[in-house]
Amino acid sequence: MSGLVYNLAFALGVGIALFGLAVDYVMPGASPGFNIPQLLIVAAGSLLALGALGLRRYGLPRRSTGNWLNLCAQALLVTLVTLLALELLLTALSHPTYYPTELSETPLERAPWWTCDELGCRFVRDVVMSACEDGELRGRSCIVNEQGFADTQDFTYSDDMSRRPRILMLGDSFTQGYAADVGDSFVETLERLLPEALVWNAGIGGTGTNQALATFAGLGPALRPQLTILGFFSNDFQDNLYPLDSKLRSVLDDGTIEVIRYYVLDAAGNPLRLELTASLLEYARAGRLPIPNEFERLVGNTRLGSLLLQLKERIDALNVSSDAHFERAKELTRAYLQSLQQSVAAQGSEFLVLIIPFRPDLTPPKMRYETLIQTLRELDIAYLDPSDVLKAPEDFAPHPDVHWNSAGHQKVGALLSECVEAFIASGDFSGCQYVWAPGRS
């Protein structure tokens, strides 16, 4: 009889271990990757199988077998009761679950004032103006030209503009002017200090270098800029891993505007599209994207399981420099920068990258910041590093906002205008000590 029990325990252990290994492929909502809960399942199943195999092979003294089985049953009962009591206690104390417990399959609607096409992602001006009149959008969000970019003037070119310096600005939210008062962004400061120049601002928040490449391909030939400036922030490395239209802008019933990314990365760094439902929004608000496989979600819906997942999160946070997808991000970013460099040169325009320091990059520079500088030098792309003129915290918006405030924008705008003025005068950046250019140490 004991042999049958051991055989069943061995089979059960093997089944549990195999389930832990294959859960990503048999459960709904699975995603590639091996996590701690799966590891615990595999370990528990393996120990049960090995223990049963050992007992079947070597057995136990006959007189002690009954006592041993009785003790195991008692220990199992005590363990289950203890775990149940802890779960009830944590529930009574309102300890939050790691993952949302109430899921909705209601579809999320895209905001009608946002579109993505051959020029990249941008605004729909008529819809934006209507939303501004209704109070859905306000402030800087209401600065949109006919082409859908954050500029007060339309992007046009005529022969009478040929004698004026022409500058095309590309980039993300910093270039668009986030966290700066209207009129105080670094692009607006550049325009104010160089009134003879035409400055076209094509920066769009939440985009990467792939957006800049698409935008220049559409605007460059028509506008014929003499100078093209790309504002590059460290999160552009991550943004470059995703498609141009990877972010959803949605207006909720209460008028709240939500922006979430509806793609996640698999283990190889390939983007996977998520279903646009209200559940996705709940996970994004909780900071729990990507949505886990069904097993991990069930674990994270218990209080004890939530404690385990929070412990895992803290352990992962100890290794803050690790990034499983950074090599892939570097590869793509390098390719986009090189393509943009070649496209700009083909239009007879000079190319300058404005490095946008993150607050922690000031002392000392972090990995992505140093990687960008190394990449730009390897590609012989001129860059402007404004780190020396920025001070933390006075030039940055309050935490958790990562942008410069109006003071920071104005400092960078003044520095940029000085370097651009030197370029206009001589045709190169030799007159600006803050610009690294090929051939300069």
Image: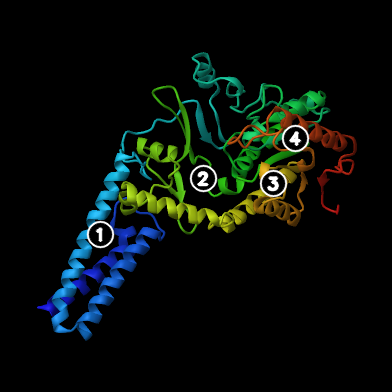
**Which is more toward the observer, 38 or 123?**
38
Disc 2 vs disc 1: Cβ atoms closer than 8 Å?
no
Rendering coords of residue 242 (x, y %): 52, 47
Query: For mark 2, what is the residue?
Result: 243
Report crowding for label 3: few under 14, some 14 to 19, many 20 or more residues within 10 A (C-alpha).
some
Query: For mark 3, what is the residue?
Result: 361
Q: Is residue 11 above or below residue 202?
A: below
- Say which amino acid is labelled 2: Pro
Query: Residue at horizontal 40%, vertical 36%?
Result: 281
**Which is more toward the observer, 44 or 33?**
44
Q: Is residue 332 above or below residue 93?
A: below
Would residue 389 be found to the left or right of residue 45 on screen? right
Q: Secondary structure at mark 4?
A: loop
Disc 1 vs disc 4: Cβ atoms closer than 8 Å?
no
* Cα–Cα span, label 2 and label 4: 27 Å
* Cα–Cα span, label 2 and label 3: 27 Å
The label number, if any, that marks residue 225 in the structure image: 4
* Cα–Cα span, label 1 and label 4: 72 Å
Q: Nearer the viewer, mark 3 or mark 4?
A: 3
Q: Nearer the viewer, mark 1 or mark 4?
A: 1
Query: For mark 1, what is the residue?
Result: 79
Query: Residue at horizontal 41%, vertical 26%?
Result: 252
